[in-house]
Amino acid sequence: MELAIGPLLFNWPTEQVEAFYARIADEAPVGTVYLGEVVCGKRQPPLQDVLARAADRLEAAGKTVIWSTLAIPSTPRERRLAAELAADPDHLIEAGDMSAVWSRAPAPFVAGPLLNVYSAPAAAELVRMGCVRLCANIELPLTSIAEIAQACPGLELELFAFGRLPLALSSRCAQARMEGLHRDACRYVCDHHPDGMDVATIEGKDFLAINGLQTLSHGCQLVDVELEALKQAGVSVLRLSPHSLDMIAVSNLFLEFSTGRIMAEELALKIEPLGPPGPLVSGYLHGMAGARWGRGGVAA
């Protein structure tokens, strides 16, 4: 079972980004690292040089680098950059939206979890267009992932195994609006919340998290299905989404889990003291509400 670090969803200072990927290159037991801005095109320019250096260091350490495209390329510049990246024959890319797929096909690509692929026929159509790996939509239960695996032999299936779940994207920035700002002059206020800004209901109950244009789950997804069941469902890669806690410790625990040295219950017990950004959740994997934990329990 391969481990992968997903693209960074949050707006961290460039120094923190560079230090993060340096540690991933030198210390993390992962085979693949996704690089690139997928949430907001305004964050792209400051990161370009940092991510280029990170890619060199990661590849020198033996990691596979996959470049992720924006999920909502809205301006002419963003659409041009996404198309250029998708069309680059020298790099494997993760398509964040269908325009990247069309720019890429028929060359190989990874289908990201924001593409809204909910069925085996949809996955099969992407395979026909060149898809070699699919990171399943976070709402899919393991039974649906197994159906995709059966219908698409040879397709690598990646599971979002750790991190706040990316639920939705908007062309408007909720965080800028909360600060009385417009998206065009947002002052990058999303950098105030390295794991997203917690949002509560009117009654004061923790509900969601906001990351600029993106809505995330309040809870932190943690796979709680045993390794053999994941393999039987066709899962071959576990994706760990970057957060501000010690991701080296997280990846080392997942290495123990993915090699059968610890079970899912022990993985959860050892992850919790590291300080995930919200309560552990796993409901979607079992066909239940995503905010639930396990096969019926409610997240604390």
Image (cartoon, rainbow, N blue to C red):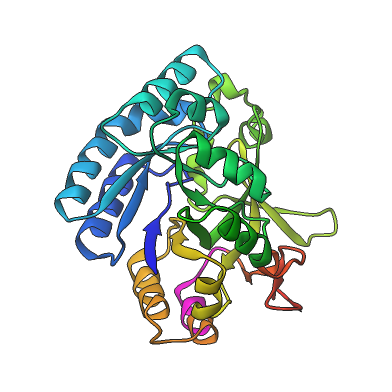
Q: Quick check: can you spot residue 114? A: no
The part of the image, by quadrant, that contains residue 206 is bottom right
The part of the image, by quadrant, that contains residue 44 is top left
Please indicate whether residue 166 sits to the left or right of residue 188 in the image.
right
Place of residue 57 in the rendered image (x, y in percent of width and height, measured from the top left):
18, 48
Residue nearest the observer in this picture, 171 or 260: 260
Q: Looking at the rendering, in which quadrant would you find the C terminus?
A: bottom right
- Residue at (51, 53) in percent of width and height: 195
Place of residue 252 in the rendered image (x, y in percent of width and height, measured from the top left):
34, 74
- Residue at (56, 30) in percent of width and height: 98
The residues colored magenta run 269-277
Q: Is residue 90 above or below residue 133?
A: above
Q: Is residue 217 above or below residue 49?
A: below
Q: Quick check: can you spot residue 173? A: yes
- Residue at (46, 82) in percent of width and height: 270
What kind of secondary structure does the magenta stretch mostly adopt? helix
Q: Is residue 196 above or below residue 222?
A: above
